Image: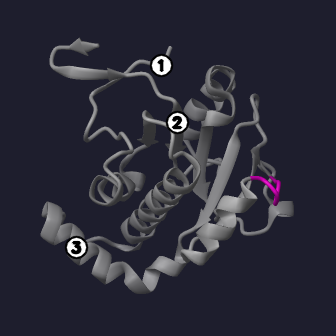
């Protein structure tokens, strides 16, 4: 269906990425956690939230319940691709599946990543301080996770949507636009019909 020359998409699978998944620090945590129950009711296991693995100790994080066997086949592939992830449930109403990603292995590659973003998108990161670098590496790592998961777990799904919250995850949008344009982001779809 078309509306104002914009494709209306009903997602088969939805990834939602935020710095505040299992990391209660601000308003986006409230936004996502209050709609999670309804989203899980609509999509079930086809809804995954992605957050940064900033706690790195499951017992210390009250928001994350690790389930090591969740997506175990994909996790083995992800590990071979160099991705460091943990899987489980977000301890909120609806208990959505969650992937926490350790983005710190990307720090040695940051200059190469930012150079590519400059060459491809004219994204100026020269004056970006640590909070910018850390957030961009998380967004990039989340994009890698989504690309890997989509390629190895979701081959038969046509409408895979990735929603990235705030500037902190924007590098993931650029990564997917470049590396897996099959995944729908705000760049290549304007309207998403969900509720």
Q: What residue is pinned by disc 2?
A: 14
Secondary structure at badge 1 equals loop
Write down the residue under mark 3: 116
In this figure, which colouring scheme has been used for the structure? one colour
Q: Is residue 69 magenta?
A: yes
Cα–Cα span, label 3 and label 1: 34 Å
Write down the quadrant of residue 6 in the picture: top left
Q: Nearer the viewer, mark 3 or mark 2?
A: 2
Element under disc 3: helix
Crowding at dot 2, Cα within 10 Å, few <14 / some 14-19 / many 20+, comes out as: many
Please provide percent x and percent y for residue 143.
44, 57
At label 3, counting other C-alpha atoms closer than 10 Å, the crowd grade (few under 14, some 14-19, many 20 or more) is few
**Number of dots carrying numbers:** 3
Residue at (52, 41) in percent of width and height: 16
Residue 39: where, in percent of width, then height?
Answer: 61, 25
Most prominent secondary structure in the magenta stretch? loop
The reply to whether callout 1 and callout 2 are in contact (CB within 8 Å) is: yes
Q: Is residue 108 left or right of residue 178?
A: right
Query: Tag 2 or tag 1, which sits nearer the N-term?
Result: 2
Which stretch is magenta?
Answer: 66-70
**Displayed quadrant of residue 72:** bottom right
Q: Position of residue 44 (x, y in %)?
A: 68, 29
Residue at mark 1: 194
Characterize the local packing of mark 1: few (<14), some (14-19) or many (20 or more) Cα atoms within 10 angstroms: few
The residue sitting at 79% across, 41% down in the picture is: 91
- Taking 148 as reference, is 44 left or right? right
Which residue is pictured at 55% across the width and 54% down the height? Answer: 149
Q: Is residue 102 visible?
A: yes
Label 1 to label 2, Cα distance in Å? 10 Å
């Amino acid at each position: 269906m078309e509306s104002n020359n914009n494709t209306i998409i009903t997602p088969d699978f939805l990834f939602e990425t935020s710095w505040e998944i299992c990391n209660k620090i601000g308003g986006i945590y409230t936004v996502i956690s209050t709609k999670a129950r309804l989203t899980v009711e609509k999509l079930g296991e086809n809804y995954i939230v992605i957050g940064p693995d900033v706690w790195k100790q499951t017992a210390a994080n009250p928001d994350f319940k690790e389930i090591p066997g969740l997506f175990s086949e994909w996790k083995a592939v992800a590990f071979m691709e160099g991705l460091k992830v943990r899987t489980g449930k977000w301890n909120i109403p609806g208990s959505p599946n969650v992937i926490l990603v350790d983005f710190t292995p990307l720090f040695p590659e940051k200059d190469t990543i930012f150079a590519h973003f400059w060459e491809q998108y004219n994204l100026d990161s020269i004056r970006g301080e640590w909070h910018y670098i850390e957030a961009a590496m998380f967004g990039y790592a989340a994009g890698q996770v989504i690309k890997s998961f989509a390629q190895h777990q979701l081959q038969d799904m046509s409408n895979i949507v990735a929603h990235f919250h705030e500037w902190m995850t924007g590098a993931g949008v650029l990564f997917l636009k470049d590396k897996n344009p099959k995944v729908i982001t705000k760049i290549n779809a304007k309207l998403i019909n969900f509720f």
